[in-house]
Image: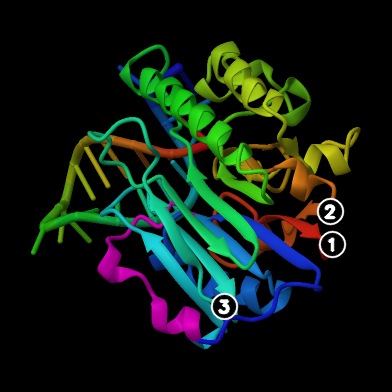
DNA sequence: ATGACTCCTTGCAGGAGA
């Protein structure tokens, strides 16, 4: 497919943890149709590479690259009217890491990193150790990306609630891996490299959530967590014009427990 | 609270998610 000219146009870049591309395909296609993101980073495909529904996604007007895995994990990058040019799959720093949690592409002038950070529960334990080690690898790779001096977005499910303001009530989650001081400190060190948390930058004093537990009517009661983030390099942050969550998707038929989260970027 | 809900599996109950 011929690459669309992204130069000179506003771009909507989104991240969406679909929680199973197999059962979520109708909801994904409805969202693509209604919101027309230019770039969509997907997480938790929960499907092997061969099961990726490329034909349906192409019919919706998107090209895609993906890194699947049976049952768990799995990430993809979709681009509307353009082919993402893959830069890497897998986060550097541990050749033995078999989880499909990172994929990176160039789309026009923009470098897009799509990530699914480990949940880390229960903590303490090996899963939490893996989460913290993964965060360190992400921090190192992000430093490399930032050093490019290019427009870069690191988008995905970070599985980190940055502060107690990013959750309906921290009390019952105090021991959860998503709220641990180590997780939050690592996320903060990432930001301190010079990345902008786009949702928080656009909405400094508004409680915004991107995930609502399937349990206990959390969606109906708006008991959410903000864990899906888009981090912008300075070259992209200066072009940030809007950021928000497509909450309506969480209220749809057979929804994911996450809602799509997005930024709008002005032309360069 | 070893709970709940929903996804996945060469499934049929159990692991994982957050």
State whether residue A2 is above or below residue A181. Answer: below
Same chain under badges 2 and 3? The reply is yes
For residue A55: magenta? yes
Kindly give the residue lying farthest to the right in the view shown: A205
Query: What's the mark number on residue A239?
Result: 2
Relative depth, front residue between A218 and A85: A85
Instruction: Give whichever of discs 1 and 3 has the lower sequence position.
Output: 3
Residue A95 figure quarter: top left
Chain letter of the residue beneath label 3 in the structure image: A
The magenta segment is: A43-58
Rendered location of residue A26, percent (x, y): 52, 75
Q: Which mark is residue A144?
A: none
The reply to whether residue A208 is in sight is no
Q: Is residue A191 left or right of residue A45?
A: right
Q: Residue at x 67, y 22 (%)?
A: A188
Secondary structure found at label 2: loop
Number of residues whose C-alpha sits closer than 10 Å to that of mark 3, classed few (under 14), some (14–19) or many (20 or more): many
Q: Which residue is mark 3?
A: A82
Cα separation, mark 2 vs mark 1, equals 5 Å
Specify the subunit that label 2 lies on.
Answer: A
| Label 2 – label 3 distance at C-alpha | 21 Å
């Amino acid at each position: 497919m011929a690459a669309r000219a992204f130069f000179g146009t506003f771009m909507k870049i989104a991240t969406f943890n679909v929680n199973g591309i197999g059962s979520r395909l109708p909801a994904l296609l409805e969202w693509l149709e209604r919101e027309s993101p230019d770039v969509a980073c997907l997480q938790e495909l929960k499907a092997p590479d061969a099961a990726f529904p490329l034909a349906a996604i192409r019919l919706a007007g998107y090209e895609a690259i993906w890194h699947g895995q049976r049952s768990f994990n799995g990430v993809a990058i979709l681009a509307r009217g353009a082919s993402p040019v893959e830069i890497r799959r897998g986060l550097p720093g541990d050749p033995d890491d078999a989880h499909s949690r990172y994929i990176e592409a160039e789309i026009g002038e923009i470098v897009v990193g799509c990530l699914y950070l480990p949940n880390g529960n229960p903590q303490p334990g090996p899963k939490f150790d893996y989460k913290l080690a993964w965060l360190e690898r992400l921090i190192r790779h992000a430093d490399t990306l930032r050093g490019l001096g290019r427009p870069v977005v690191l988008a995905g499910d970070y599985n980190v609630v940055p502060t107690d303001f990013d959750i309906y009530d921290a009390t019952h989650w105090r021991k959860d891996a998503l709220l641990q001081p180590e997780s939050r400190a690592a996320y903060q060190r990432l930001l301190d490299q010079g990345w902008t948390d786009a949702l928080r930058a656009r909405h400094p004093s508004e409680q915004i959530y991107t995930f609502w537990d399937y349990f206990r009517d959390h969606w109906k009661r708006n008991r959410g967590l903000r864990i899906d983030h888009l981090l912008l390099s300075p070259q992209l942050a200066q072009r940030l014009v809007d950021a928000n969550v497509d909450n309506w998707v969480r209220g749809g038929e057979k929804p994911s427990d996450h809602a799509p989260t997005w930024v709008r970027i002005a032309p360069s």
